[in-house]
Image (spheres, rainbow, N blue to C red):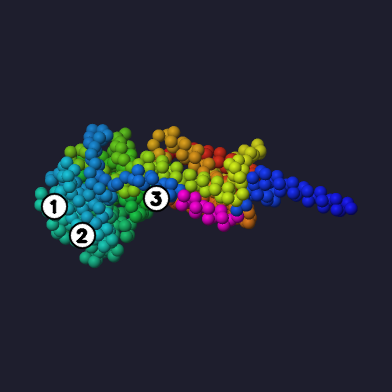
Amino acid sequence: MVSRVRVERETCETARAMEANLVGGEVAKPKREFPYSNWGPWAAILAIFGALAVGLFLSVPALIVGSQEGKIEALFPPDYSTGASFDQGDATALAVDPRANRLFADHEDEVRAFGALGQEVGGAKITGIEDSHGLAFDSRRGLLWVSEKGPGKILTYSVAGKKAPRQLGTIEARSLSSLTGFEPERMAVNPSGAGALYAIDTADDRVVEFDAEGHIRGRLDASRSDAGSFDFGSDDNDIAVDIAGPGRGQVFVLSGKGDGTVWGFGPRGGLLWELKPESGDEFASLAVDRQGNLWIAEPNGDTYEYAVSATSRPPERTGGKIDAGNAPSAVEFAGSGHVFVARELDGTLTTAGSIISQLGTELGFLLVPLALASISGARGLPAILRRLGFRSFKRSAFGWMALTFFLYLAFTIFYSLVITEPKQKDIAESFGPTVIQVLLIVIAAPIAEETCFRGMLFGGLREKLPRLVAALITGVIFGGLHALTGVTAVPPLIVFGFLLALLYERTGSIVPGILLHMLNNSIALLGQ
């Protein structure tokens, strides 16, 4: 009899619990503290791809209203705040013919020529070029040198006066017994004396010096440097020569792989100094003005003046600055004092386009988790948010937040000292005003990313997987998706994502992770 009463009582309690769940709008599920999801690992992983797809779809308007095309700009002295744009496409290198007032622009498969007013000189165009990434002009002899990186050649053209270019010769590895591999990229000319052509050879990480006839005169020796040799990457390399200043005859080389380094060499090829960018900066291009001062352009468009001396002391900033615009691929000073800037802007977004693109990405990370929680049984926005981890938390969570941030900071310091300094692309500036940067990076991004990666992904993975395994997978996916903004920053972000997942489970809420994520993004924004 007692047993029967107990069974009836338990049956009634179960029925009341099921009724309460149904009235509350959520499908009945076993009562437990964590995880709150019930969609499982595969649905969570597929939803990540869905969030990316939705983000890309919502970002399409950014390409329509905010895409910029590559161009060349002429900036006028004295403050270089005004100028004129011309040319279309992605110019990779520039060279100036001061006697004919012509500018030559390298477009990889052709070299275009422009007059003093920016009008294209069709008769001076050079076509039929393959994979060119460098130009150099010898003003004393009227020679234009054009590199062909893929085929491994340097072509010589006579462009004296107003005549059409005429090819005079070719430098290639098979005609030079001392060169095995040869991939010439950026070039510079010292027209004084016997003349010298310097070419960056990315095949063997070296700079080769040629005479006016194309014979090898030597190589720039970087063996006495801290690195022991050049380290040329696939882009952001450059070379320039001081032909008029106190360091006359000095050669400046930008080895742009990674953070980039500028090297100074004396007229005889000896290493004088090395110059590394300040923390948070990168080098993108070099130029030398009529006074022999070195100008170094950074990817964000800030181009700074450095005073060069005849000593082995590295140059220092003078305070001179030119706003060359984003993504400068080449900077060249003309004899009149104005500056030509080639900008790699094919597909680059305007401020409005960047904002739309960022909003699209963050909406994708937010809307898909909300939809997944909804179709998995949660009814109403409060229930959906609870299922994704938006819940209250105890005071002890602040201690776990401090521990999480300490562990992340400790790993980042270790990674910076032992492996490499993590670098991420500075996207904040593309969003315009500071208030917009704060709204998108400090507020919106942490909310959307924690909802997607911790609330949806980690919550789904924990349905079937152990805590550490689920947290590790979450961290790898979270960090890996940031590779486009900087590969070196991926390992610390994997650790950050891993720790945030553990913080979510320990506190029972994604709100502490959101706050910690906001703190991290605030520090990053202030550092930029």
N-term mark: 3 or 2: 2
| CB under 8 Å between discs 2 and 1 | no
What residue is drawn where x is 46% and y is 46%?
361
Label 2 and label 1: CA atoms lie apart by: 14 Å
N-term mark: 1 or 3: 1
Q: Mark 2 is on which residue type? A: Gly
Classify 9 as above or below 519: below
Residue 28 inside the magenta-drawn segment:
no
What residue is drawn where x is 16% and y is 42%?
116
Q: Nearer the viewer, residue 32 or 228?
A: 32
Label 1 and label 3: CA atoms lie apart by: 40 Å
Residue 328 located left or right of residue 399: left
Q: Residues within 10 Å of mark 3 (few under 14, many from 20)?
A: some
**Image location (x, y in percent) of residue 341:** 26, 43
N-term mark: 2 or 1: 1
Q: Quadrant of the rendered structure where residue 432 is?
A: top left
Classify 372 as above or below 304: below
Q: Which residues are magenta?
A: 40-54
Residue 120 located left or right of residue 325: left
The label shown at residue 128 is 2
Label 3 and label 2: CA atoms lie apart by: 32 Å
Q: Residue furthest right?
A: 1
What residue is drawn where x is 10% and y is 52%?
163
**Image location (x, y in percent) of residue 2:** 88, 51
Asked which secondary structure carries label 1, the reply is helix
Q: Which residue is mark 1?
A: 123
Please name the predominant secondary structure of the magenta segment in the image: helix
Asked which secondary structure carries label 2, the reply is loop
